[in-house]
Image (cartoon, rainbow, N blue to C red):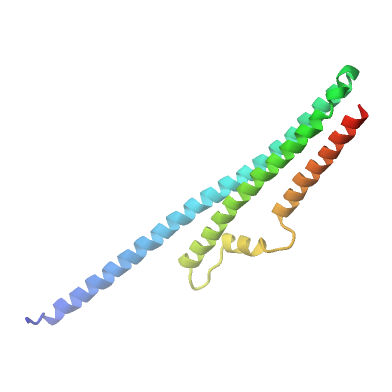
């Protein structure tokens, strides 16, 4: 076996270290790119939630307008019960859409927290880590929204039954 000159061995070691640094840098950049993508998805799903809430209340407002219009016409009052019944179905549909959306943005938050831990292993801090800690609270935004959707659905179902029996 041929002996390598001392500086050749040193150069080989430097090349190996340089290659490791390059791979580590590429992995770090790849993790940063994933983190940015998770952030975009998280914002998309949270925005989707706000749009759902907005459209839910607009829908309730529209149903209220339709109910008032029908109520002013005595000859149509016998179908008035359909409006709150439709509101019940829509409330349940919006609740299901919000529940599905919650699963998606919580998945983004979990992945984001994992990426934060990998990007900053000495002190993993970040918005996703904090979000994952907050969601373990007893009263969450999701719980409040679920109550709004479900209590409204129940109220509308009872209103529909009352109107059906009265008219």
**Residue closest to the eye, 86 or 64:** 86
Q: Quadrant of the N terminus?
A: bottom left
User: Residue, x 49% and y 73% (percent of image)?
Assistant: 122
Quarter residue 33 falls in: bottom left
User: Residue, x 22% and y 76% (percent of image)?
Assistant: 13
Residue reaching furthest to the front:
165
Position of 31 compared to 17: left or right? right
Image spot of residue 118 (x, y percent): 46, 66
**Residue closest to the eye, 59 or 16:** 59
- Position of 36 relative to 13 (above/below): above
Q: Quadrant of the C terminus?
A: top right
Image spot of residue 2 (x, y percent): 6, 81
User: Residue, x 17% and y 78% (percent of image)?
Assistant: 9
Quarter residue 77 falls in: top right
- Position of 83 relative to 74 (above/below): below
- Position of 82 relative to 91 (above/below): above
Position of 84 compared to 33: left or right? right
Image spot of residue 24 (x, y percent): 35, 66
Residue reaching furthest to the left:
2
Residue reaching furthest to the right:
166
User: Residue, x 14% and y 82% (percent of image)?
Assistant: 6
Position of 136 compared to 70: left or right? left
Image spot of residue 128 (x, y percent): 57, 60
- Position of 100 relative to 134 (above/below): above
């Amino acid at each position: 076996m041929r002996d390598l000159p001392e500086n050749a061995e040193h150069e080989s070691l430097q090349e190996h270290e340089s290659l490791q640094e390059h791979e580590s840098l590429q992995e770090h950049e790849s993790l940063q790119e994933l983190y940015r993508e998770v952030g975009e998805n998280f914002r998309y799903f949270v925005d989707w939630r706000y749009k759902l809430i907005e459209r839910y209340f607009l829908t309730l407002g529209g149903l209220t307008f339709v109910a008032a219009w029908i109520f002013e016409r005595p000859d149509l009052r016998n179908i008035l019960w359909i409006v709150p019944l439709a509101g019940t179905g829509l409330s349940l549909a919006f609740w299901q859409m919000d529940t599905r959306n919650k699963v998606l943005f919580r998945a983004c938050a979990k992945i984001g927290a994992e990426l934060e831990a990998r990007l900053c292993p000495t002190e993993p801090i970040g918005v996703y880590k904090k979000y994952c800690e907050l969601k373990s609270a007893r009263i969450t935004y999701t719980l409040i929204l679920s109550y709004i959707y479900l209590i409204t659905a129940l109220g509308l179902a009872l209103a529909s039954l009352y109107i059906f029996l009265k008219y």
